[in-house]
Image: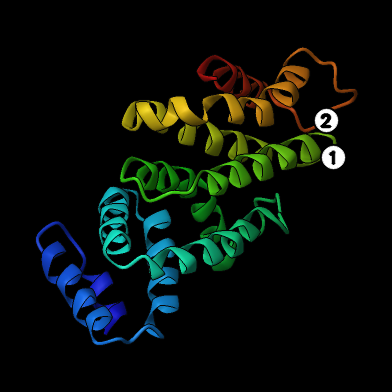
Amino acid sequence: VIGNKLNSFTSLTYNDTRDFIYQIMDSGETEFIKDFIEKVFSKATAEELFCALFAKLIAEIAHKYPIMYSEMNRYHHEFLNVFEDIEDTSKDTSDTLIRRRLYRLGYGQFISELASNNALEKEQLYAMVSKVMDKVWLYTSEAGKNKTVEEFVDCLVRLIKSLSQKSPVFFQSVKAEMGTRILQKATDLIEKKAGDRPSLSAKAKFGLMDLKDLL
């Protein structure tokens, strides 16, 4: 039932979907939360058009029922696994690979939307940017990872740009700490102080320059 509600989720069905979740929460049923969070994360990161709406929904529910936050935190850590086990090849067009790429690209946007709705713990944000920047550092040193590096840098740029625009107050409160986790590696890559980097393309380098400017 939850899956059907989310599959037909739009601004027109927002109140109906929210109130339906409220009814379940009021009944004391919490087993569904895991499935609900998983579906929201998956759909929000894959459907950019509705990303903000999903973030608003989950934030509104979590503010009323704080138990939702613990499940969000758990799933956030699990979701970061989409930045692992990378296959950087145009030959692999499996549904799983495509879906993971969509998730990675949409994740930064979703995180920024959650932040703008005051539904994001700072440690979640720091964990995400640290993970992605560490992977950029690693993959630039490996041959054949150009597309992955560009994708990861784009994810960070989307996140930080969206944060600065949608949540300027929150952004100012996390800007310095994000900088400590990103800027040194980004600067070293831009200035070619990081040794041989076969997968550092011009596109990725320009993205890193954008990151530096934003931070």
Residue 34 spot, x, y in % from top left: 45, 77
* Residue density around tag 2, few if under 14, some if 14–19, many if 20 or more, within 10 Å: some
Q: Out of 8 and 71, give the one closest to the viewer.
A: 71
Q: Secondary structure at mark 1?
A: loop
Give the side of residue 186 with respect to residue 46, left or right: right
Decide: is 62 above or below 212.
below
In which quadrant is the N terminus drawn? bottom left
> What mark, if any, has residue 142 been given in the picture?
1
Secondary structure state at the residue bearing disc 2: loop
| Alpha carbon distance from label 2 to label 1 | 6 Å
Q: Are marks 2 and 1 in contact (CB under 8 Å)?
A: yes
Q: Which residue is mark 2?
A: 198
Q: Please tell me which residue is depicted at 18% across the width and 77% down the height of the picture.
A: 20
**Can you give x and y, in whole percent of width and height, for residue 121 in the image?**
48, 48
The x and y percentages for residue 5 are 23, 75
Residue 28 occupies quadrant: bottom left
The number of numbered badges drawn on the structure is 2
Residue 80 shows in the view: yes
Question: Mark 1 belongs to which amino acid?
Answer: Glu
Which percent across, then down, holds residue 8?
21, 70
The residue most toward the left is 12
Mark 1 or mark 2, which is nearer the start of the sequence? 1
Q: Quadrant of the C terminus?
A: top right
Q: Is residue 94 at least partly visible in the picture? A: no
Q: Residues within 10 Å of mark 1 (few under 14, many from 20)?
A: some
Q: In this rendering, would 199 be left or right of 125? A: right
Instruction: Name the residue located 70 percent from the left edge and 56 percent from the top edge.
Output: 84
Name the quadrant containing residue 188.
Answer: top right
The reply, left or right, for residue 142 in relation to residue 94 is right
Nearer the observer, 19 or 44: 19
Which residue does the image show at 37% across and 51% down from the upper left?
Answer: 119
Say if 120 sits above or below 189 in the image: below
